[in-house]
Image: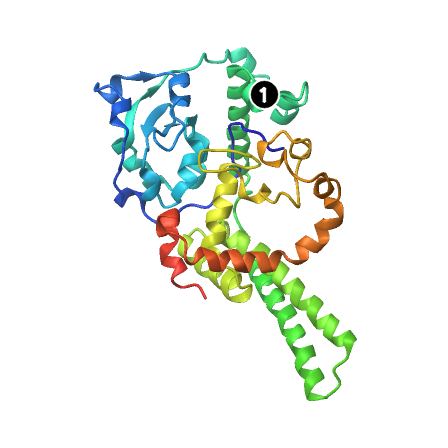
């Protein structure tokens, strides 16, 4: 449910550009004492106080970096600011390749003060699901947990991911994706065949038209999920292959801007179900006033919806399906608007944007 909390993303798309070739700009040196970064200790409270565009600090693996102004060069654009004032270790690992680590020292300003470590006895008790253990008892939000509980949660997530890696759960089946692409193209071919044969035989009927439309809709729906997987770089190890496949399936077959979608979806994974960050909240839940995706939004805990007409809120179950029928139109409009958006918003997507049709 949407909350203003710290986030642990499950997965995300790596940027297209090479961060190592970029240079830091706009660092807020007036905020940082002139002492060696290796000697400076920064408290969690001090880190949290630098959560604005004017002064943005993040922590990665217990080291603190000043990234003020870097969103204008960052391949993901403003997505960088979703972690301002927070420990971004898990976010950073999810979004970046190993080659990115070599440039972090350019931004280093100090070391994060260490929280009290958990005792070994409690480490042995972590076999229980972190969801049941941390969140089920009294409905706590992540910010309401103690430092020890937060560390338990993070450790459980990392352990779960390590276990999944050992099980090769993230290894894709190339045969499966080849089958999905070919079967999807077959659906499209059948749809076109029905229309063409009906016209050639001068026997166009309402039934054949509806059947062809349903098959074409199924083709587009399947293209959406295929593009999602390719653009998540989960099919091939080589990101270039994923981007090319995503360009064909998402842009050419389905007709939306994959650069726009990647920027939006990266932001979603950086701030999943979060209503507010320095760079804005999760775009996937910003569908009010027509659709509200959680009880907290419906109850009006977010400032943005307090003035919404109650008619829209109470009748969204009626609007849901008609709105989804127009979603494709919305995606096309947003894709077109994205083509004229400022380039610094998505530095890493410029090369691919120029190839889109």
Q: Secondary structure at mark 1?
A: loop
Is disc 1 surrounded by few (<14), some (14 to 19) or many (20+) residues within 10 Å? some
23 sits left or right of 235 in the view: left
In the image, 197 versus 273, the foreground residue is: 273
- The residue depicted at 40 percent of the width and 15 percent of the height is 114
- The residue depicted at 38 percent of the width and 42 percent of the height is 97
In the image, 184 versus 257, the foreground residue is: 257
Image location (x, y in percent) of residue 307: 63, 36
In the image, 252 versus 184, the foreground residue is: 252
116 sits left or right of 28 in the view: right
In which quadrant of the rendered image does the C terminus lie?
bottom left
Question: Does 354 appear above or below 80?
Answer: below
Image location (x, y in percent) of residue 311: 73, 42
315 sits left or right of 324 in the view: right
Q: Quadrant of residue 314?
A: top right
Question: Does 330 appear above or below 95?
Answer: below
Residue 3 seen from this side = yes
Residue highlighted by disc 1:
126
**Number of marks in the image?**
1
In the image, 312 versus 140, the foreground residue is: 312
In which quadrant of the rendered image does the N terminus lie?
top right
Image location (x, y in percent) of residue 177: 56, 58
Q: How is the image coloured?
A: rainbow
- The residue depicted at 58 percent of the width and 30 percent of the height is 3
- The residue depicted at 32 percent of the width and 38 percent of the height is 70
Residue 246 seen from this side = no
Image location (x, y in percent) of residue 355: 40, 64
């Amino acid at each position: 449910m949407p909350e203003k909390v710290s986030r642990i993303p499950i997965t995300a798309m790596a940027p297209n550009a090479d961060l190592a070739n970029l240079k830091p700009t706009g660092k807020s040196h007036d905020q940082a004492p002139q002492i060696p970064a290796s000697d400076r200790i920064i408290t969690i409270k001090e880190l949290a106080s630098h959560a604005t565009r004017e002064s943005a600090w993040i922590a990665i693996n217990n080291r603190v970096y000043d990234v003020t102004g870097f969103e204008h060069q960052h391949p993901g654009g403003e997505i960088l600011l979703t972690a301002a004032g927070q420990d971004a270790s898990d976010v950073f690992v999810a979004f970046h390749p190993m080659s990115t680590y070599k440039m972090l020292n350019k931004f280093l300003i100090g070391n994060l003060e260490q929280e009290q470590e958990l005792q070994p006895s409690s480490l042995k008790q972590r076999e229980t699901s972190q969801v049941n253990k941390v969140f089920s008892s009294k409905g706590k939000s992540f910010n309401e947990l103690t430092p020890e509980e937060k560390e338990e949660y993070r450790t459980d997530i990392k352990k779960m991911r390590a276990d999944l890696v050992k099980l090769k759960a993230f290894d894709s089946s190339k045969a499966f994706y080849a089958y999905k692409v070919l079967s999807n193209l077959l659906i499209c071919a059948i749809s076109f065949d029905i229309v063409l044969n009906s016209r050639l035989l001068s026997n166009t009927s309402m039934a054949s038209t509806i059947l062809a439309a349903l098959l074409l809709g199924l083709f587009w729906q399947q293209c959406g999920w295929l593009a999602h997987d390719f653009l998540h770089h989960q099919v091939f190890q080589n990101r270039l292959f994923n981007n090319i496949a995503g360009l064909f399936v998402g842009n050419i077959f389905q007709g939306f801007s994959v650069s726009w979608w990647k920027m939006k979806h990266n932001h979603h994974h950086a701030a999943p179900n979060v209503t507010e960050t320095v760079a804005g909240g999760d775009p996937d839940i910003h569908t009010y006033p027509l659709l509200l995706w959680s009880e907290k939004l419906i109850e009006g805990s977010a400032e943005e919806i307090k003035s919404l007409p109650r008619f829209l809120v109470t009748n969204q179950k009626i609007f849901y399906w008609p709105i989804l029928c127009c979603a494709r139109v919305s995606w096309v409009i947003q894709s077109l608007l994205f083509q004229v958006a400022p380039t610094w918003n998505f530095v890493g997507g410029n090369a691919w944007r120029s190839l889109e049709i």
